[in-house]
Amino acid sequence: MACVLIVKTGDAYPEIVDQHGDFETLFENQLNAALPAHLNVQVWDARRNPTAPALDTLAGILITGSHSMVSDAEPWSEALKPWLQEALANDTPMLGVCYGHQLMAAAFGGVSDYHPAGRESGTHTVRLTQAGQRDPLFSQLPESFAAHLSHAQSVMQTPRDCTVLAHNSHDAHQALRYGSRQWSVQFHPEFSVPVMRAYIERQRAALRDQGENPESLSAEVTEAPEAASLLQRFLAFV
């Protein structure tokens, strides 16, 4: 049976894990609703197990978010870069999310770092570029759609040969494509409304410090079905 690998790069906050599951569980909940019989999902915690799975055993790769920062260049994170480069060279289907988005961009020649405008949290509108409207993964989405976001760092400089698929007023690089079947997104397709609100609650002080209103952000959290659909749509390319 072919394996779709979730590369775990971090843990959600304890109260989120207790109530909703950790990052990999949020991914699994979305994937299992559309998982074909010939695929199974496995999890590799790249922080705790330094031995990367052999790429020829994998049908696809998903990379989770993390509370780590790509620019800190932690050894486990840096060790992922050549593995991701090999996966791209092998045309292994990939989808990176948040930290995974920033890590893929850094691995392929871009720069990920703190966003000068600060943190982006809550449910916000993301807009497809013209390339995004033609992209095989994104083309079935509306030109503008809601997405859950929680990040302090962003892809500040894209790799030379990638394509920008989506953007918004905060972040010029909300979604990128690197090869024929390799994508990454800054937003969280795996988040639910309760998870998004729990993140805003955790970030209340930081959001206030940068002039945001956490109460308003929490009240404006809505369902984001189009963004969520990307995880299941990704399985069609595996």
Image (cartoon, rainbow, N blue to C red):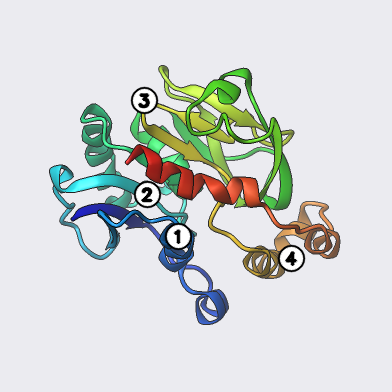
Element class at badge 2: strand
Give the mark nearer the N terminus: 1 vs 4.
1
Residue ID for mark 4: 205
Say whether residue 175 is left or right of residue 81: right
CA distance for labels 3 and 2: 16 Å
Asked whether 111 or 53 is in front, the reply is: 53
Amino acid type at circle 1 is Phe
Residue name at image x 39 percent, y 41 percent: 236
Name the spot of residue 92 as percent of width and height, x first: 26, 36
Element class at badge 4: helix
- Label 3 crowd (10 A; few <14 / some 14-19 / many >=20): some
Image quadrant in which the C terminus is located:
top left
Image quadrant in which the N terminus is located:
bottom left
Give the mark nearer the N terminus: 3 vs 1.
1
Say whether residue 45 is left or right of residue 101: left
CA distance for labels 1 and 4: 28 Å
Amino acid type at circle 4 is Ala
Amino acid type at circle 2 is Leu
Element class at badge 1: helix
Residue ID for mark 1: 27
Give the mark nearer the N terminus: 4 vs 2.
2
CA distance for labels 4 and 2: 31 Å
Residue ID for mark 3: 180
Q: Which tag is nearer the camera, tag 1 or tag 4? A: 1
Give the mark nearer the N terminus: 2 vs 1.
1
CA distance for labels 3 and 1: 22 Å
Q: Which tag is nearer the camera, tag 4 or tag 2? A: 2
